[in-house]
Image (cartoon, rainbow, N blue to C red):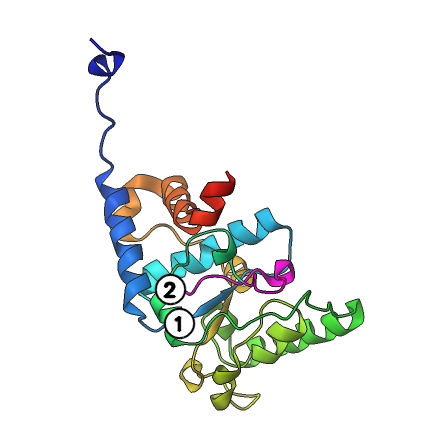
Amino acid sequence: PAPGVFVPPPPVDAAAERLRRQLRRLGESCRAPFLPIGGTNAFGSLVNALVLPLKFAVASNRTMLTPPLGAYANGSCATLACFYRPLAPACERANGYPAPVPGPRPRSSVVDALAVKQERRRRAKRCQGAAAAPRCDDYEAIEALGEATIPRGWRAAVPRPDSCDETSCRVPTLQASALKKIGVDPPPAAYATQGGFWFVSQLLAHLLRPNDATRRRV
């Protein structure tokens, strides 16, 4: 008989399948969508940081849009969907995302970037920690730091500079770096017995599902 006859089928991870269904459902529902911002670090660091906003999406039952590539964006390549499957394709199309990137994004000088970051921290402090939740007052800083290109249609309802209300814009943003500062929450109760390593592994696997073009290249 063929060798496969003696090999038992792999065990079914019911919890992993349940989490995959939840992530697919969130991607299709367009429920209170938000745009995660991972920063402009090395690519591996960028991807690992994006686990935190995806954990927030699962815990809060919200739709997370495909993360932008930040400093790696170039021309038509603006999000992780350049290499991996988009997280919420229908929701992103409905919201005009991603905005086209005309070419290599100019980088702010160190002095200018520091000033933008300091102002961002002042706003977060004024909102009493709202940086660790989706917010609407960060579009300008995001573009100035080269973290993403914000679609023009989102700017119609930009709040006052002192606003802390995430409902005052079309799609709020969430900084992964802000989530790091408040610590890493344990997995939701539904997945608690699997542990944190399992949970993060599943979220990374969801973020890094190769698209057709990447599969062909590999």
Q: Taking 28 as reference, is 155 left or right?
A: right
Q: Position of residue 31 (x, y in %)?
A: 31, 71
- Amino acid type, label 2: Pro
Label 2 Cα crowd, 10 Å radius (few <14 / some 14-19 / many 20+):
some
User: Which residue is label 1 attached to?
Assistant: 93
**In the image, is 87 to the left or to the right of 140?**
left
Classify 193 as above or below 8.
below
Q: How many numbered circles are shown? A: 2
What amino acid type should be assigned to the residue bearing mark 1? Arg
Q: What segment carries the magenta color? A: 64-78
Does residue 18 appear to the left or right of 174 in the view shown?
Answer: left
Instruction: Based on the picture, tell me whether residue 66 belongs to the magenta stretch.
Output: yes
Whether residue 62 is visible: yes
Callout 1 crowding tier (Cα within 10 Å): few <14, some 14–19, many ≥20: few
Q: Position of residue 195 (x, y in %)?
A: 35, 41
Up/down of 126 relative to 9, above or below: below
Q: Tell me whether the residue at label 1 lies in contact with that at label 2, contact meaning CB atoms closer than 8 angstroms.
A: yes
Residue at horizontal 53 percent and vertical 57 percent from the top: 180
x, y percentage for residue 122?
63, 78
Which mark is on residue 77? none
Residue 183 seen: no
Cα distance in 3D space between marks 1 and 2: 6 Å
Q: Main secondary structure of the magenta part?
A: loop
Residue located beneath label 2 in the image: 89
Give the structural element (helix, strand or loop) at label 2.
helix
Q: Which residue is drawn at the image coordinates 52% and 61% (left, top)?
A: 79
